[in-house]
Amino acid sequence: DAMVIQNPRYQVTQFGKPVTLSCSQTLNHNVMYWYQQKSSQAPKLLFHYYDKDFNNEADTPDNFQSRRPNTSFCFLDIRSPGLGDAAMYLCATNSGEATNEQFFGPGTRLTVL
Amino acid sequence: GEDVEQSLFLSVREGDSSVINCTYTDSSSTYLYWYKQEPGAGLQLLTYIFSNMDMKQDQRLTVLLNKKDKHLSLRIADTQTGDSAIYFCAETTRNNDMRFGAGTRLTVKP
């Protein structure tokens, strides 16, 4: 089945220790997104790629970076995680069709010790 | 304001109807969406409505759209315990991104 896969599902890191979260998709969609979701809050868009074009949200901290080496993979790098970065990180894709539907992965829950 | 607003919690009894309400912000949104998130899972699209419609029905789900008041609702008929989840309302933004509400946690009691 075509899908969005996120690894790992659970990630524990130490304060200040760089961490990378990964997302892959078999849908061959042009657009990929990274969201941060904290408890009882709306998913917050961090950035997205339209093909190789990177679009950063204005309020995304510099601590968060992303890479998209090819259509299928997208990575979220957190250079120096703080306690406030503990959250669920959701990857999503979009085919660019008129309905603008986004397809989500299961998320990676990041814990910062 | 800039936030999509939803009540945080709703509790119903099994077999009753559930109505989840949402107020969105952007009157130019082309589509409005309802997503469902089960524990430990990502968001799954339940249904969407095109902005020139005022109602859409899909089996047990009915979506009502009031563009004048920027109000969207999701009605689930004959609610089952498997419907327990968090339901997110979302609108498209001018950048063609998606803006989500904080989600309504639906609890279905047997």
Image (cartoon, coloured by chain):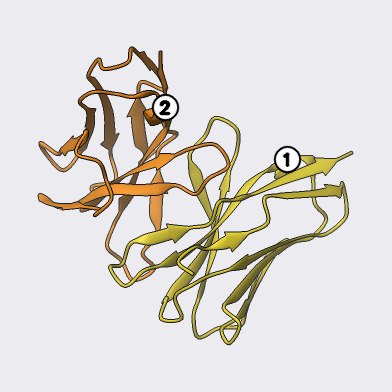
Chain colours: A orange, B yellow
User: In percent of the image, x 54 and y 30: which residue is there?
Assistant: B40
Query: Residue A53, percent across and down?
Result: 11, 53
Question: Mark 1 belongs to which subunit?
Answer: B
Vertical comparison of A26 with B92: above or below: above
Badge 2 amino acid? Ala
Displayed quadrant of residue B97: bottom left
User: In percent of the image, x 62 and y 65: which residue is there?
Assistant: B22
- Marks 1 and 2, Cα distance to the nearest angstrom? 29 Å
Q: How many marks?
A: 2
Vertical comparison of B104 with A37: above or below: below
Query: Residue A16, percent across and down?
Result: 26, 17
Q: Using residue B38 as the reference point, say whether residue A76 is left or right of it.
A: left
Secondary structure found at label 1: helix
Q: Using residue B73 as the reference point, say whether residue A46 is left or right of it.
A: left
Query: Residue A37, percent across and down?
Result: 45, 40
User: In percent of the image, x 67 and y 50: which residue is there?
Assistant: B8
Question: Mark 2 belongs to which subunit?
Answer: A
Q: Which residue is mark 1?
A: B82
**Residue situated in front as seen by the camera: B106 or A101:** B106
Q: State the quadrant of the N terminus of chain A.
A: top left
Q: Which residue is mark 2?
A: A86
